[in-house]
Image: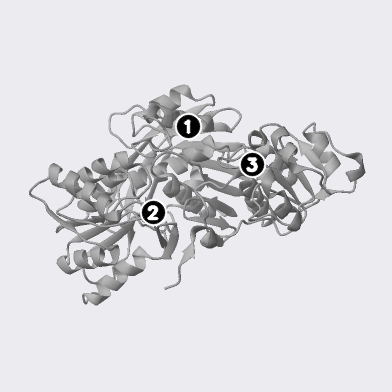
Amino acid sequence: MVEMTIQEQIPPILRPEAVVPVPLKAFAQKFSLDWAPEASDVTLTGISMNTGDLRSGDLFVAMPGRKTHGAKFMAQALEQGAVAVLTDAAGAAELGQLSVPVLILENPRAHLGDLAAYVYGNVPGNMPKLFATTGTNGKTSTSYLLEGILRQMGEVTGLTSTAERHIAGEVIVSRLTTPESPEMQALIARMREKGVTAVAVEVSAQALSQLRVDGMHFDVVGFTNLSHDHLDDYADMDEYLAAKLPLFTKRRADRGVVCLDSKYGRLVAKQSEIPVVTITSEMGVDADWHVAVTAETPRYTSFVLAGPNGINIRSRVPLLGIHMAANAGLAIAMLVEAGFDANRIAEAIKDGIDAYLPGRTERVTGETGPDVYVDFGHSPDAFLNTLAAVRKVTQGRVFMVFGADGDRDASKRPAMAQIAAEGSDVLVITDHHPRFEDPASIRKTLVDAARAARPELEIIEVSPPEAAIRKAVSMAQPGDAILWAGPGHQDYRDIRGVRTPYSARAEARAALKESGWS
């Protein structure tokens, strides 16, 4: 088995194939920066904050980091072809004499998105329609569904999500949920180059806190929900919510759609600077849009969406659960808010939304055997919704296999175990990404919480996860269902800083085959 370090296996940054060179003089004047007149022949063809991706013709942005200043990497940047450097006064003091122009700008990270947008030509009037979705759960699903609907309407689409980047049909593995702003701007420029007319962007709270979507202005933004997660990054739920709210400002977007299915939806709608409409899948809740499920099967969920001015759209998603129908409704409402005709949308998706969502309650079962679903959910709320969805379409027992991330929000682990225990008939606790934590210690926390919640439940601790899924499959029968939560689309496990190639989908299929199922 080949192992790679985290850095070695990160996919490359995507850039446009051709860039119109930007004169350094014009760049400096645009941002009111002093520049050296003798550098009047210097032109920029890219921008980078990371020497790991710096290319010839780039402006190197040397910023202060957590451990050191980017100026310390200037020699490497020059070797790789940087033609100029932008840094703050502290960085300039470390540079010494250089053969390239030096531009001074304090707090460069706060300006990085705008700098990159200018270099790559991403300016108003020259952009595809941009959609952004944020929330704890459902960001990826909503983004994929939105892109799928756009594609069915004949648009040339782009997508950037936790799982993948899409550029006019080209599919690339993602680096981060939301890329750093220079990468994001380069990605959008490549999409423009390929004729993309509309882009769905998944935006995390961390991306907003770290200014990764700076330099972008969205036509419509959407909010799915907020629940317990990422409290290793944010002090409490109020701070976590506050990290999401900048997406709903005039600086970031024109309009918004807010789901009211979590209690935080009303707070987002109330505090939004931009006009918003609301949507819900809950009965008796006052909202502009309402989603109602009409049928649920192991392969799809049908729904009807009722909106303003008599809008009534019927469709289905190739996914389980009312929460997935709610994500589809949110995507449709965002398109209507962006100016797409509701009748055109309804006609395009009358036979269903054509979207493949990797690792989102993905059914990996053949024609025989128990139903096995692999899912990316890794929060208490995600477990609650997905287990409920699986239960509704399962005649027999519901098995659940899961582990928890190491070196991530440990406060949610007991709640994850409690919900897993309460929603399953057999619980198999295993490993996920232990990172630098002791996996046995993580499992013990989960087992103890699950047993406290349901002492009578059959709880099995199995390590590693390859053995855990085989144990579950060996116990299950046709009519039963197995939900393997956590790994989803990911093709590796993070073990002590090493990305070990690993596919839960492949392991689940192998386990079924070994047990005699197709």
Disc 2 from disc 3: Cα separation: 26 Å
Mark nearer the viewer, 1 or 2: 2
Disc 1 from disc 2: Cα separation: 26 Å
Q: Which residue is mark 3?
A: 69
Q: Is residue 171 above or below residue 237?
A: below
- Give me the residue at 88% from left, 45% from top: 39
Q: Nearer the viewer, residue 393 or 251?
A: 251
Q: Amino acid at mark 1?
A: Ala
Q: Quadrant of residue 89?
A: top right
Q: Which residue is mark 2?
A: 435
Label 2 residue SS: loop
Disc 1 crowd, CA 10 A, few/some/many (<14, 14-19, 20+): some
Hey, which residue is sitting farthest left in the picture? 456
- Give me the residue at 70% from left, 54% from top: 76
The mark found on residue 132 in the picture is none
Pick whichever of labels 1 and 3 is earlier in the sequence. Answer: 3
Pick whichever of labels 2 and 3 is earlier in the sequence. Answer: 3
In the image: residue 258, left or right of residue 299:
right
Q: Which residue is mark 1?
A: 243
Give the image location of residue 376, x and y in percent.
36, 53
Q: Amino acid at mark 2?
A: Arg
Give the image location of residue 493, x and y in percent.
39, 60
Residue 257 showing in the rendered view: yes
